[in-house]
Image (cartoon, grey):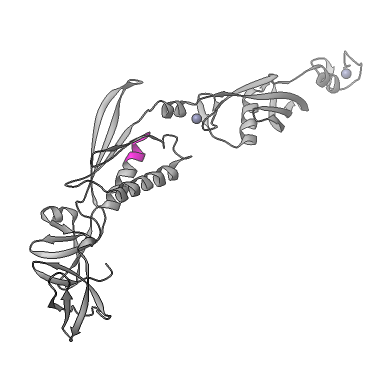
């Protein structure tokens, strides 16, 4: 058998010797230009129907693989690329393809250009459009949250959003609203809303109640918006409170535990947040007075009350360090109590 092209004798492929067969055929085609949409806000690129964030080189290889087409009978196909960024959005790509046709090895060189077209991805258009899925309401029961607490809440919000950015495309804040007594956060995802609500409840002590509202139907399914209402404790760390005729100072709190210091014996006592519902707020750190020590014994010290200019006996709790010329005291109708660093 002879090649009809060059007359060489040997194995033939569609009437041609191997060399002529390879020379006469192109087995792989690739478009001259490949257009890819890229989001101007987040840099995500569109691949088929999805928006993805990916490494440039890796992404270009995937795009090339998607856009090459092989003739029938091509097996063991592989692609190598060399990309050259002409500028940010235009990439010249040299494509080398390896394949087998029958038992012949085929290597081809192609050139293409990947062009990134500026657009806005679905998630960013949601974000820009003020879309939200979850609302977190931060409130206190009987008082307004102070500026320090509001600042801390915003700090926690940024922290949690920051942790999820890049992993969760809905991790965005649509809006933060300062409302009477607290804050409202409008968020891109329910999961994030829930995470933030939990974090706030554990930071400020308090509870979260969830509610959902039907807002419409999408793809045949009901869509809901969630509200996470965070109700913080009415007390802050450092506050003095009265509970069941005893006096305490708030040491710390979380969503399910409150640690109080009993003023008379200086013992730490744990409570549940709901135990504090009937507690009365006496005041905060502003109640603490510096008083001069006049004399001291094992069990007591005598201090000068600057308001009455009278000397008062104050019981010295066991192990309490009341050295120095003056001590910190808080006074209530129940008596005078020494206050430590907390
Ligand atoms: Zn030939
Ligand atoms: Zn985007």
- Is residue 190 in the magenta section? yes
Position in image of residue 117 (x %, y %)? 59, 23
Examine the rendering and report whether any part of residue 26 can be seen: yes
Q: Which residues are magenta?
A: 187-193
Residue at 26 percent across and 55 percent down: it is 254
**Position of 306 relative to 280 (above/below):** below
Ligand 1 is found in the corner quadrant, namely top right
Q: Can you tell which quarter of the image residue 332 is in?
A: bottom left
Q: Is residue 70 visible?
A: no
Residue drawn at the location 13% of the way across and 65% of the way down: 247
Estimate the x, y position of residue 174 in percent, counting from the top left.
38, 33
Question: Quarter holding the C terminus?
Answer: bottom left
Of 153 and 295, the residue lying toward us: 295
Q: Name the image quarter holding residue 94.
A: top right
Q: Is residue 93 above or below residue 220?
A: below
Q: Residue at x 45, y 25 (%)?
A: 125
Residue 223 against residue 178 in the figure, above or below:
above
Q: Is residue 171 left or right of residue 242?
A: right
Q: Quadrant of the N terminus?
A: top right
Given residues 168 and 306, the one toward you in this image is: 306
**Farthest residue, direction right:** 7
Percent across and percent down for residue 153 are 33, 47
Residue 202 included in the magenta stretch of the image: no
- Indicate left or right for 235 with 105 as reference: left
Residue 6 location, quadrant = top right
Please determine whether, in this image, residue 263 is positioned above or below residue 193: below
């Amino acid at each position: 058998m002879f090649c009809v092209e060059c007359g060489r004798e040997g194995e033939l492929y569609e009437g041609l010797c191997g060399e002529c067969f390879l020379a006469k055929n192109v087995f792989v085609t690739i478009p001259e230009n490949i257009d890819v949409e890229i989001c101007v806000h987040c840099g995500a690129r569109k691949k088929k129907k999805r928006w993805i964030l990916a490494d440039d080189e890796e992404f270009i290889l995937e795009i090339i693989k998607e856009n090459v087409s092989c003739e029938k009978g091509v097996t063991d196909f592989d692609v190598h690329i060399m990309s050259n960024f002409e500028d940010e959005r235009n990439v010249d790509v040299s494509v080398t393809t390896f394949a087998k046709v029958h038992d012949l090895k085929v290597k081809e060189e192609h050139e293409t250009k990947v062009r990134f077209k500026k657009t806005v991805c679905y998630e960013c258009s949601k974000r820009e459009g003020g879309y939200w899925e979850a609302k977190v309401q931060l409130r206190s029961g009987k008082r307004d949250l102070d500026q320090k607490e509001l600042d801390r809440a915003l700090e926690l919000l940024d922290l949690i959003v920051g942790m999820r950015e890049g992993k969760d495309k809905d991790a965005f804040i649509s809006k933060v609203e300062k409302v009477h007594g607290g804050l409202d956060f409008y968020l891109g995802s329910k999961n994030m809303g829930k995470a933030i609500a939990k974090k706030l409840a554990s930071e400020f002590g308090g509870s979260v109640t969830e509610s959902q509202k039907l807002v419409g139907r999408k793809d045949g399914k009901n869509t809901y918006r969630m509200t996470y209402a965070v109700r913080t404790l009415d007390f802050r760390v450092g506050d003095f409170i009265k509970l069941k005729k005893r006096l305490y100072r708030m040491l710390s709190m979380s969503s399910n535990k409150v640690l109080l210091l009993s003023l008379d014996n200086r013992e730490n006592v744990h409570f549940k947040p709901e135990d504090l519902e009937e507690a009365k707020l006496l005041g905060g750190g502003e109640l603490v007075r510096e008083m001069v020590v006049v004399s001291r014994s094992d069990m007591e010290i005598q201090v000068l009350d600057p308001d009455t200019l009278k000397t008062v006996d104050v019981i010295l709790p066991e192990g309490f360090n009341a050295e120095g010329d003056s001590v910190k005291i808080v006074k209530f109708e129940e008596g005078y109590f020494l206050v430590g660093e907390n």
